[in-house]
Image: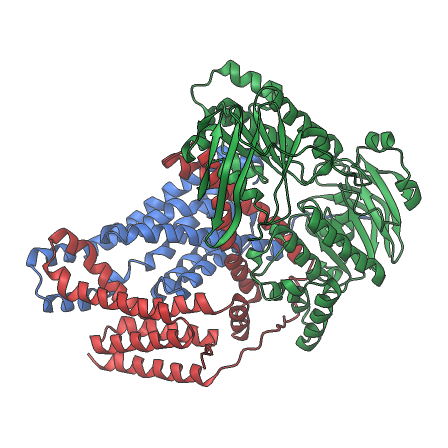
């Protein structure tokens, strides 16, 4: 009797879930590194998703290579999102952007059949939306924030600077930075894949 | 007499969500401040008295920063920190609850809570693995750091060199842990049971009640 | 209980790891699978517990495997796991939970067992295996041996008919192996079927009913208990097997005073907070000598070598190299440690670049010579992660030599190695000493001690 395992099924098995969980932990560590930097200045905070996109490509692409099945990226992202929200580090807004980013990434991955670099890269751009929820409150809370500080009697040019930071223009910068960061992060990951991971035989 | 009280992880999650709503409702200071104090009390009741005191002190410092110091600070400092300080004050209740849960809720209790809420088993498995892997990441980092010191690798090169051993370790652990988990039935579709029994106590209901009251206050008092 | 009939197996379709393996194991038998590294013994264990074919992708399997009346290839792993329990060799990566109680209950919870029964079964497990001290603890605070005990207990709690152990003693010290031996004793007494794939044989000789020797993926010989024990030494070495009987170590003790030439440690004290690890430790070792550092868990071996390498700052004492006192940075520069997990120390994408990373101004001829000495020159363009364990170790040593490090420390270099590989490490260590390096080896491998070491520093747990 011959039993040969042919192509694996598309259901997530124990090994896939555990792999996703481990990479989620690494993804969360990337978040923690980013949080440290973003606390220093609002501009850095607005660039937080950019920094995450640069670094998170490594766990993301490794997961894409190891688990070419539907749901893996969604679980990896949402686990990290849940940990971020439950630990009080981020608001529920971030939870929502995670949901949007992860879902879109999965849809793209499914459409591009899981194994093309370009497909995974487009999915990664959407995946990088996850982190946008962190600085988003700057714009959501804009009115209330300015109402509050105007009562404190701050100098006008200071208010103007803050106004510029919370402007719709900066919102465009935010999303543009996400896309650029995701592309750069993908190239970084690809470089590492060629230099190390493929040569080492781990993908 | 010094017996610690516990809150159910489900209460923690509910309070967190309610605190998020309170935060974004952006009500007056006394509403938000009272909520922070009530949560600090919860922290104290659960045995983290020292942390509660530290958190309250930090909150006070943040308030002083926002209302007294930043308005008179030089422009660069004011612009750098005011948004951050404002946001921290807003999210403070969430941070307190988050830290309380991390400190006092064992992972196994959390898993049972998520199961009771019918979260997908697949998701729960990945979630538990992620939390279980954090201490391992710390250990790995320690070893790799030591190795880099001995090889005289410094600065930015350290960041680059960190990647390969970390990822190799992650993948190897994934393989070995999966083998150990599947040979102990983790893929079994039958509903999993647990030795842990979760029950909501009076403390849980009181705090959930207060949470809703404060949501109401936050939305309607401006 | 276990039937393996005409099995051919390959991890990829081109080569066969196992060729026409036939093995029948009766209920209650304890069977040892032994052989050199790569002979296929681990692969056979995977046939039994179902990791082959369910866990391996794109492999080719022919033949029939039945275990506990279940057709392994046709039964799901979670069904197989009810009858077949598996313990693996790496204590660090077998536990799924953060606390010991959850880990013990893990398998039973996965099966959906009634909590009342789980509680009863856990109480039995704790009692039968004497693991009261392991209850209610954080797994990350356990020693390697305790982790392995926990893994074993977690599988025992499932009460499977068959136990499959894949090199369970690989990362354990002497004490932990004694615990393991007691646990296997319990299994035998209860009538479980036990299959063990192992390198380290001395602790098993009392239990095994049969020993099966594999070479190149085929079962070459089967020994009965008596035949196995009475095997002459030369024959055993020819088969590539480790020693069957423990012998005493008669190595002289380390020099207890300081010295001008070589490594001199004087009055070294270290504590973690209030907990004293060692106090007023004084010893010395000269170039050309291989010093073994032994001792039970918690005695401070790892702490000591980290101090010596300059990774940990001591509270008191002096460390001198050739008469010159070395502070932390100096020790960093002068010493190197080949760690238990060599993967932590390899950073480049080729063997050549790995050496270049250590010392940019080292001449190419020097690097070539060093790599050649370690039989690594032919791999100079290969990625370090594709090398075997032994090759990685030698590469790590090569990077140290390229940086002209005088003090070389090895941390358990022979874990899980077969006889031939152990002898290779032994010759490497000896050569390094002969070349004038100061060599220290932390080890509990007494066969290695006998071949490679000159003196012993035995650390004992500090009792204040």
Percent x, y of residue B7: 45, 77
Reply above or below: C416 against C189: above
Tell me which corner region of the image, top left, top right, bottom left or bottom right, holds residue C110.
Answer: bottom right
Percent x, y of residue A153: 8, 65
Percent x, y of residue C131: 68, 63
Residue found at x 53% / y 71%: B109
Percent x, y of residue A137: 27, 63
Residue found at x 10% / y 59%: B72
- The chain coloured green carries which letter? C
- The chain coloured red carries which letter? B
| Pick the front one: B222 or C119 | C119
Left or right of residue A160: residue C426: right
Reply above or below: C12 against A11: above
Q: Residue furthest front?
A: C257
| Pick the front one: C377 or A120 | C377
Residue found at x 39% / y 66%: B99
Reply above or below: C134 against B36: above
Left or right of residue C158: residue A55: left
| Pick the front one: A145 or C318 | C318
Reply above or below: B99 against C366: below
Count of labels in the image: 0
Tell me which corner region of the image, top left, top right, bottom left or bottom right, holds residue B11.
Answer: bottom left
**Can you see residue A79?**
yes
**Can you see residue C375?**
no
Residue found at x 32% / y 84%: B213
| Pick the front one: B77 or C73 | B77
Left or right of residue A52: residue C437: right
- The chain coloured blue carries which letter? A
């Amino acid at each position: 009797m011959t039993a040969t395992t042919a192509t694996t099924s598309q259901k997530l098995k124990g090994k896939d879930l555990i792999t996703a969980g481990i990479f989620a932990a690494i993804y969360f560590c990337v978040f923690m590194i980013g949080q440290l930097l973003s606390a220093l200045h609002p501009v850095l905070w607005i660039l937080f998703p950019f920094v995450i996109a640069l670094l998170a490509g490594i766990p993301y692409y490794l997961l894409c290579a190891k688990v070419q099945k539907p749901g893996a990226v969604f679980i990896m992202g949402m686990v990290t999102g849940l940990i971020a929200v439950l630990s009080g580090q981020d608001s529920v807004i971030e939870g929502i952007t995670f949901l949007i980013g992860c879902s879109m990434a999965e849809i793209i991955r499914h459409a591009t059949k899981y194994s093309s670099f370009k497909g995974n890269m487009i999915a990664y751009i959407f995946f990088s939306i996850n982190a946008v929820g962190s600085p988003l409150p700057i714009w959501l809370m804009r009115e209330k924030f300015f109402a509050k500080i105007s009562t404190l009697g701050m100098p006008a040019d200071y208010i103007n600077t803050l106004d510029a930071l919370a402007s719709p223009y900066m919102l465009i910068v935010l999303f543009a930075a996400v896309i650029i960061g995701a592309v750069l992060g993908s190239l970084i990951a690809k470089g590492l894949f060629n230099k190390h991971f493929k040569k080492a035989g781990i993908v | 007499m010094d017996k610690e009280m516990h809150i159910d992880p489900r209460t923690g999650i509910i309070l967190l969500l309610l605190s998020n709503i309170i935060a974004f409702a952006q009500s007056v200071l006394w509403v938000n401040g009272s909520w922070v104090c009530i949560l600090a009390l919860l922290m104290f009741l659960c045995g983290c008295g020292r942390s509660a005191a530290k958190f309250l002190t930090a909150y006070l410092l943040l308030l002083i920063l926002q209302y007294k110091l930043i308005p008179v600070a030089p422009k660069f400092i004011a612009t750098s920190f005011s948004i951050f300080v404002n946001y921290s004050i807003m999210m403070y209740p969430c941070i307190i609850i988050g830290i309380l849960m991390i400190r006092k809720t064992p992972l196994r209790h959390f898993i049972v809570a998520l199961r009771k809420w019918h979260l997908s088993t697949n998701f729960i498995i990945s979630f538990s693995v992620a939390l279980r892997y954090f201490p391992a990441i710390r250990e790995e980092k320690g070893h790799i750091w030591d190795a880099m010191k001995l090889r005289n690798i410094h600065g930015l090169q350290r960041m680059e060199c960190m990647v390969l051993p970390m990822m190799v370790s992650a993948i190897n652990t994934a393989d070995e842990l999966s083998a150990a988990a599947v040979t102990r039935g983790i893929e079994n579709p039958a509903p999993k049971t647990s030795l842990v029994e979760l029950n909501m106590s009076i403390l849980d209901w009181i705090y959930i009640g207060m949470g809703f009251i404060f949501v109401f206050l936050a939305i309607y008092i401006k | 209980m276990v039937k393996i009939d005409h099995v051919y197996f390959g991890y990829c379709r081109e080569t066969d790891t196992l060729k026409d393996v036939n093995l029948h194991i009766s209920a209650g038998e304890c069977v040892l699978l032994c052989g050199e590294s790569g002979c296929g013994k681990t692969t056979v264990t995977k046939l039994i517990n179902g990791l082959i074919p369910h866990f391996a992708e794109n492999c080719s399997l022919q033949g029939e495997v039945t275990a506990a009346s279940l057709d392994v290839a046709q039964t799901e792993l979670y069904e197989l796991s009810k009858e077949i329990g598996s313990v693996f060799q790496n204590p660090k990566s077998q536990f799924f939970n953060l606390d010991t109680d959850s880990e013990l209950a893990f398998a039973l919870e996965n099966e959906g067992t009634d909590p009342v029964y789980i509680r009863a079964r856990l109480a039995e497990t704790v009692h039968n295996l004497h693991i009261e001290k392991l209850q209610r603890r954080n797994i990350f605070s356990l020693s390697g041996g305790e982790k392995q005990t926990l893994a074993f207990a977690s599988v025992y709690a499932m009460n499977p008919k068959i136990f499959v152990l894949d090199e369970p003693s690989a990362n354990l010290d002497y004490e932990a192996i004694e615990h393991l031996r007691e646990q296997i004793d319990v299994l035998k007494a209860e009538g479980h079927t036990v299959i063990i794939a192992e390198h380290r044989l001395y602790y098993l000789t009392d239990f095994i009913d049969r020993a099966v020797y594999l070479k190149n993926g085929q079962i070459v010989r089967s020994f009965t208990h008596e035949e196995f024990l009475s095997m002459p030494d030369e024959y055993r070495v020819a088969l590539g097997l480790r020693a069957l009987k423990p012998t005493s170590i008669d190595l002289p003790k380390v020099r207890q005073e300081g010295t001008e030439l070589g490594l001199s440690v004087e009055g070294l004290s270290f504590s973690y907070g209030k907990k004293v690890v060692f106090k007023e430790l004084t010893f010395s070792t000269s170039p050309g000598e291989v010093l073994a550092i032994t001792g039970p868990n918690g005695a401070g071996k790892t702490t000591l070598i980290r101090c010596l390498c300059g990774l940990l700052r001591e509270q008191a004492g002096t460390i001198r190299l050739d008469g010159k006192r070395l502070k932390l940075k100096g020790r960093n520069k002068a010493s190197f440690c080949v760690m238990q997990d060599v993967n932590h120390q390899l950073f480049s994408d080729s063997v050549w670049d790995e050496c270049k990373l250590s010392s940019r101004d080292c001449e190419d001829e020097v690097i070539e010579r060093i790599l050649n000495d370690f039989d690594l020159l032919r791999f100079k363009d290969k990625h370090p992660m594709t090398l075997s364990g032994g090759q990685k170790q030698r590469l790590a040593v090569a990077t140290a030599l390229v940086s002209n490090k005088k003090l070389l420390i090895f941390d358990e270099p022979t874990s899980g190695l077969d006889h031939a590989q152990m002898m290779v490490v032994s010759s490497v260590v000896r050569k390094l000493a002969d070349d004038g390096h100061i060599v220290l080896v932390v080890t509990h491998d007494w066969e290695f001690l006998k071949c490679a070491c000159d003196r012993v520093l035995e650390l004992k747990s500090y009792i204040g």
